[in-house]
Image (spheres, rainbow, N blue to C red):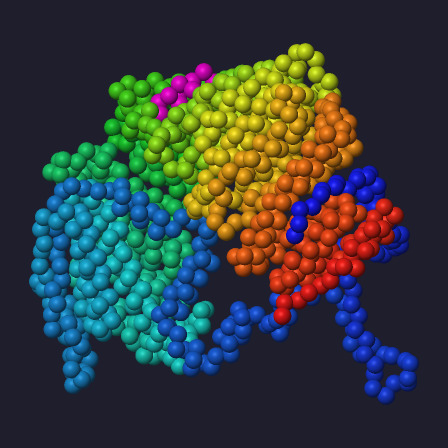
Amino acid sequence: MAAVQWRTRWRNYEAELQRCRPEAAPVEFGDYHPLKPIMVTDTKTRRGARKGSTSSSSSSSSSAAPDPLSSMLDGTDPLSMFAAASASETPATSHSTSAGDLGRKRREKEVEEAVGPDFEPWSVKRGEILARFTTTEKLSINLFMGSDKGKAPSPGSSAVSEKVRTRLEELDDLEEGSQRELLNLSQQDYANRIEELNQSLKEAWSSDQKVKALKIVIQCSKLLSDTSVIQFYPSKFVLITDILDTFGRLVYDRIWTMCSDPRPLPDSFTVDDVNDTAKETCLNWFFKIASIRELLPRLYVEAAILKCNRFLNKSGIQETLPRLTAMIRGIGDPLVAAYTRAYLCRVGMEVAPNLKDSLNRNFFDLLGTFRQISGESVQKQLILQRVEVPEYLTLYSPAINWILQCIAYRAPEPLLTEMMERCKKLGNNALLLNSVMRAFRPDFVAARATDFIGMIKDCDEAGFPKHLLFGSLGRSLACADPPESERLTILNEAWKVITKVRSPQDYINCAEIWVEFTCRHFTKREVNTVLADIIKHMTPDRAFEDAYPQLQSVIRKILTYFHDFSVLFSMERFLPFLDMFQKDSVRVEVCRSIMEVFIKHQLEPTRDPVILNAMLHICKTMHDSVNALTLEDEKRSLSLLIIGFIRMVCFGRDFEQQLSFCVEARATFCNLEPVLVQLIHTVNQLAMETRRVMRGSHSRKTAAFVRACAAYSFITIPSLSSIFSRLSLYLQSGQVALANQCLSQADAFLKAAVSLLPEVPRSISVEGKLRSSESFLLDFINNFLATLLVVPDHPEHGVLYLVRGLLNIVQDYTWEDNSDAKVRVYVSALPLLAAMSQETYLYSIPKVDSNETLYGGDPKFLSEINKLCETLIGQVLDQLKALGRDESTRRQGALAFSLFGVLLAHGDLRNNKLSQLAVNLWNLSHKHGYCDTRVSVRTLEYIKHQALQHDMAHLSDTVQRLSLQSRT
């Protein structure tokens, strides 16, 4: 391939554009619309019909195209197939499923139907109780010891009297000492021992030692009569009732399984569906439990299997609940009795949530036990254990709260009113009043908030702190609105009590609740007053350091109701309130939450100085938290929030003020690179907006301003660490400067980009993985070349100095081994040089004279372009020869076809040497069969189409010499 003389094809861009536009085709619309579903009708010829006549034997209309995925499944999908297989199982196969699992699912379904999702389940309260009621005192526990007497009687002892005697002996064995006492246990050890008993119960049950299992349950129930470490009693109740629940579940599933042979018992079974064997077994369990001597374990164990009454009697549960309720009256300790009632209510809500009479009776009996609290025996116990009355009263809270929740759930308003009146008559019982406010529906409490405040005032402060009562009232008022005329009075009455609380922790726990009520119903004035009071209470002795969760909650509630940040930041105490967050991680989290709300709800750009100063302070707090140990994800997250703020800042036509803001922001957020990138984009956008306002004709003032914008970008870009960010911003900023007729600034940007190219590393990190930088570099160079078309030459630097400088850098750059990237840049530069040779350029910038104007088609200029093109083509041809020697035929073919495309589009193929070179490149690209045949065919069709033009007729000869070859 000899050297060739380059000649650029003359182009008429306007004519080419017109030829490339698609021909307009008339369309008859009528019912036609491209998005309208296709209607398909399938018509088959009826057998024996007259020739030429048809009859529709099957017709189908589809409102949508057929689904290819559905058709692959022949009308069935895997899930439907599994469901069909399950439905077609034989009864024997179906019965192989665990009957216990079926019973458990059925129970869950029943509870879900009777109790809705608005009922807070026991499982939620369980964790709260265990976390709240702890102790450092040492505990003791009596562990059950296994005995051979617990085994089933021999087959010979079939007489009824023998059965009764054996049953009593087994129970007596437990009560007479088959146990050992473990002393000095920590709270965790105690919980572990209880869990061991739970496992022992399951193991005994699975090994068919049912009496042993019963003994374990009885022994655990006895532990609930022990109040020697009274502070731990609520947690003990939770742990032991877990065992009772397990036992009740095992017994019920066992009997239900016996009823499910040979076919499963229906969900809504009746006593008639239960076989005799199951009934006898069920009676046997109740007889065993009735033989327990002590009241408390007998009561607890029978309550645990209360649901088993369904197997014996239709009204068994309805009759048993009142009896068990009455039995609780025999328990002397009021705390033990309260928790026993709570357990009975819990079981009652699970098995018979509609039987509220017994639950109500439990509540009214509970009212009577409160007189015992002030009795001599309880007082002696408190003195002995050194427990104060307020602390003792809080032990009742979980039990009373649960009882009231069960009673108040979907209860009619007259019943709630009656219960409220009973509390009033009882008088001075803050504990009960607290539970009432927490358990009753919020709308009921809110409607009578003034009455509840009166009841709170009548309570004795010594028995139960009033701020706790107001806290419970505040929770209800946060969910439901009191009458509008009473709201200010309610807030004043509550805050009179809250502000007098001396303990900072108690104060903030209550104040945090009432902040929501204040934000919900009042203005910034009242909220500001509340914030001032919180600061006053929490600042002494740095009490705020122990209350960060509550203080964060205050911020969240304010942000929930105040979305107008001009109002929010005009509160005098809001920013001082933020200053209480001294811990770095907490302070950043709070600032982040404020920024998220700002970005979500600030819909219009702002220039409000109050908002800007406050948000700059908040953003600076987030920025200053960044250090060398900060994770990249955290930096990215903070950057996005700050960028969101920057985008919302707009000073309208005051462009100088906007630029001043960007200067301040650059100094403030210098450690977050994405923020700096956004600031550069903002300033470039500002320059373009100035150009739009001036309609491209700058005055002296605006010209100086856009030069200042260019200077801002030129100073900021070098501070970025990402080299491709710098390259991209240099190019974009140069384009902006060029559009604003800042030629020297544009020249500086473009020269800086060219000077930076040697520093591009061969690999860069992308999403944590190392990738070659070659593809990114080629993309940038192609964009850069496209810009150079409109950049005029500098009068002091010679012709095409930027193009030559770029090509020199490309030649000296260390490319990857076995890479054609360098010569691909040369191939990409040829269209640019060809475009520069035209009399009229493809595109230009208004009021900027490109080389077409500067040189005006000067022969010397065109000669320089042609020489440069010949040099580049020579370099590409040398690379093609080298690839041939290295037998890199695939790369050689791709490069040859790429150069052929450039010659075809931009070269003047009337030149014989250039035309011969194009033919040689075509043949070389197809020589080894690696060229895409479809692309080749389309290329030939294009050449033939072009040859039809009067000024391109010479292509007819060329296309005759081009042939398709396949690899052999």
Q: Position of residue 778 (x, y in %)?
A: 57, 42
Residue 763 in the image: above or below residue 518: below
Q: Quadrant of residue 306?
A: bottom left
Q: Going 63% across and 40% down the picture, which residue do you hit?
A: 871
- Whether residue 300 is situated above or below residue 207 in the rendered picture: above
- 436, 584: nearer the viewer: 584
Does the rendering let one see residue 303?
no
778 relative to 61 in the view: left or right? left
| 128 relative to 591, above or below | below
Find residue 913 and report its horizontal and vertical position in percent.
Answer: 73, 49
**Which quarter of the figure has residue 925?**
bottom right
Q: Is residue 574 magenta?
A: yes
Q: Considering depth in this image, is 483 or 138 the residue closer to the camera?
A: 138
Tell me where the magenta segment starts and ends, as one range: 571-581
Instruction: Out of 943 and 369, give the one closest to the viewer.
Output: 943
Q: Name the residue rendered at 24%, 47% in the picture.
A: 235
For the C terminus, give its image quadrant: bottom right
* Quarter of the rendering containing residue 6: top right
Q: Is residue 189 left or right of residue 6?
A: left
Image location (x, y in percent) of residue 374: 21, 36
- Where residue 873 sits: x, y (%)? 64, 44
Q: Is residue 178 visible?
A: yes
Residue 276 on the magenta segment: no
Which residue is located at x 45 percent, y 24 percent?
A: 669
- Tell me the residue at 60%/42% (across/down): 825
- Compared across the picture, whether 155 is left or right of 48 comes to left
* Residue found at the very far top of the displayed protein: 700
